[in-house]
Structures are given as C-alpha cells and as structure tokens.
Image (cartoon, grey):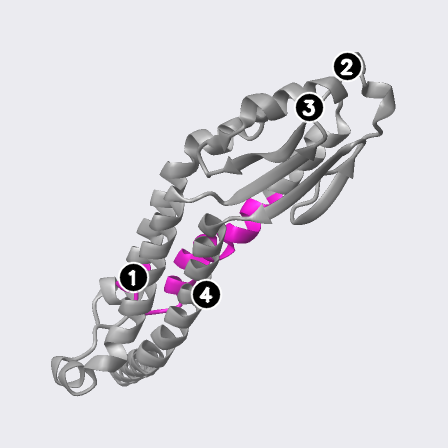
C-alpha cells in the first residue's frame, strides 16, 4: 500500500471494477450532477422580493443573484430612502464580489471528492452541502442589518419602527407590503446539496469495503513486522 493510497483511499481492482461498474459509477454521476446544478444556479436569482405600494399598483420587484441585484432597484431604493433604509447595492458587497470564485471553489472540491475514496470525500463536500444554509443566514443578516439600522434623519423615520423583512412570505412596513420568495437559483443550490448526500451514500457503499480491506491488510503487515522484529531480538 502506497502513501498516496493512505491519503486518497484505495483504488478498486480492475476485475472488481469490470464486474461492478455501476457500483463505482453512481458516486461519480451524482456528485457530477451536483457540480452541474451548483454552476447553473449562478445564472438564476436566489431570492426575489416584490414591493406593493399605492403609487405602484403593479408592484416593484428586485431579484438577488449571487453576484448582482436586478429589477426595479432604483425605484425601490427611492421608496426605502424615505424610511431611512440604505440602497440595496450596499448589501453584501464582499459576498457578491467573491461569489463566482467561491462557487467555482465549491465545485472543484466536489470534483476532488470524486477521486477521493475514503472519509475525506465527505469533508471536501461539506462546504457545498452547507452552502444553501449559509446563503440564507447571510441574507437574513443583511435584512436584519438594513431593517434595524435606519437613518434617523430620513423624512419618514419616525413613522416606521425598526423591522426585519421576511426571508420568505409577506411583510408590511407602513403602507408598503412586501412578498419575499426563494428563487430558482437557490433551489438549484439546494438540489446540489441533495445530490451530494445521495452521492456520498453511494460513495460509502462503493468504497467502505475497500477501505476496511486496506486497513485489515495494513494491520496484518504491521503484525507480521512486529513478529519478525521480536524473532530477531531473540
């Protein structure tokens, strides 16, 4: 057993690979689909909000992608200005600037897990697995930050108490009504997490017996070596 195999896990024998090809193919398929789903999510909004106001009966909408905010941003910022809320573009600037790079890194970690045949694969995929939860946590932080830190000098500041816009569902601020929804990009990222879990299940089914066999061989080799050293000492 080489030092490399100790790190990345055992390679399946060619005869076993030929006999049980599907067993070793399934982890690659599901983890590969997870990478695809995660990368495609970049092109769709993760979150969207609709603002309903008397002067805008059709509503104003903003879509939040991982790296930009689109929609009726200027009009929404104009209304938010009166209650003292900062412009939407000021939120999560660091996260948006790094988002594409971070998704690329998460994707590369999943791809690396395909070639790792031991428990290290689960550790490599953990950041991508938790990515949807981390996105929601970061989004909630910025909603809380913007809603509870209103400009005291705003024209209608005294008419509105600090508030936290909902992550999902309906909210109300003064005469405005908001409807927040998760977007298709978020659901694609969530699908990627599900595919990772399925991929890890089949990964364990495929490679755990080989890992245990490798450990058993290593234990036997150490036992033989200790025995030989004991005999030589006598």
Residue 128, percent across and down? Answer: 44, 53
Q: Residues within 10 Å of mark 1 (few under 14, many from 20)?
A: many
Secondary structure at numbered mark 4:
helix
Q: Quadrant of residue 148?
A: top right
- Can residue 222 be seen here? no
Q: Residues within 10 Å of mark 3 (few under 14, many from 20)?
A: some
Q: Which residue is mark 4?
A: 194
Residue 199, percent across and down? Answer: 37, 70
Q: Residue at x 34, y 49 (%)?
A: 39
Cα–Cα gap, marks 1 and 4 = 12 Å
Numbered tag placed on residue 154 in the rendering: 2
49 relative position to 95: left or right: right
Front residue (pair 11, 157) = 157
Q: In which quadrant is the C terminus drawn?
A: bottom left
Q: Over which residues does the magenta segment extend?
A: 113-137
Q: Residue at x 70, y 44 (%)?
A: 166
9 relative position to 189: left or right: left
Cα–Cα gap, marks 4 and 2 = 45 Å
Cα–Cα gap, marks 1 and 3 = 43 Å
Compare marks 1 and 4 and give the one earlier in the sequence. 1
Residue 110, percent across and down? Answer: 34, 57
Asked if marks 4 and 2 touch (Cβ < 8 Å), the reply is no
Viewer-nearest of labels 1 and 3? 3
């Amino acid at each position: 057993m080489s030092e490399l195999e100790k790190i990345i896990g055992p390679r399946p024998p060619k005869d076993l690979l030929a006999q049980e090809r599907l067993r070793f193919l399934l982890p690659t398929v599901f983890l590969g689909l997870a990478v695809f789903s995660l990368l495609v999510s970049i092109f769709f909004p993760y979150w969207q909000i609709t603002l309903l106001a008397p002067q805008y009966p059709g509503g104003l909408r903003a879509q939040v992608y991982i790296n930009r905010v689109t929609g009726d941003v200027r009009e929404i910022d104009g209304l938010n200005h009166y209650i003292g809320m900062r412009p939407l573009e000021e939120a999560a600037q660091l996260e948006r600037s790094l988002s594409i790079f971070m998704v690329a890194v998460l994707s590369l970690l999943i791809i690396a897990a395909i070639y790792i045949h031991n428990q290290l694969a689960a550790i490599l995929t953990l950041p991508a697995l938790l990515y949807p939860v981390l996105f929601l946590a970061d989004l909630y932080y910025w909603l809380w930050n913007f809603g509870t830190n209103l400009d005291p000098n705003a024209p209608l500041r005294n008419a509105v108490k600090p508030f936290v816009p909902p992550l999902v569902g309906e909210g109300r601020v003064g005469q405005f009504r908001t409807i927040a929804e998760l977007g298709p990009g978020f659901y694609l990222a969530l699908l990627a997490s599900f595919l990772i879990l399925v991929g890890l299940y089949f990964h364990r089914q495929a490679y755990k017996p080989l890992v245990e066999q490798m450990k058993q061989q290593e234990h036997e080799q150490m036992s033989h070596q200790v025995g030989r050293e004991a005999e030589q000492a006598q």
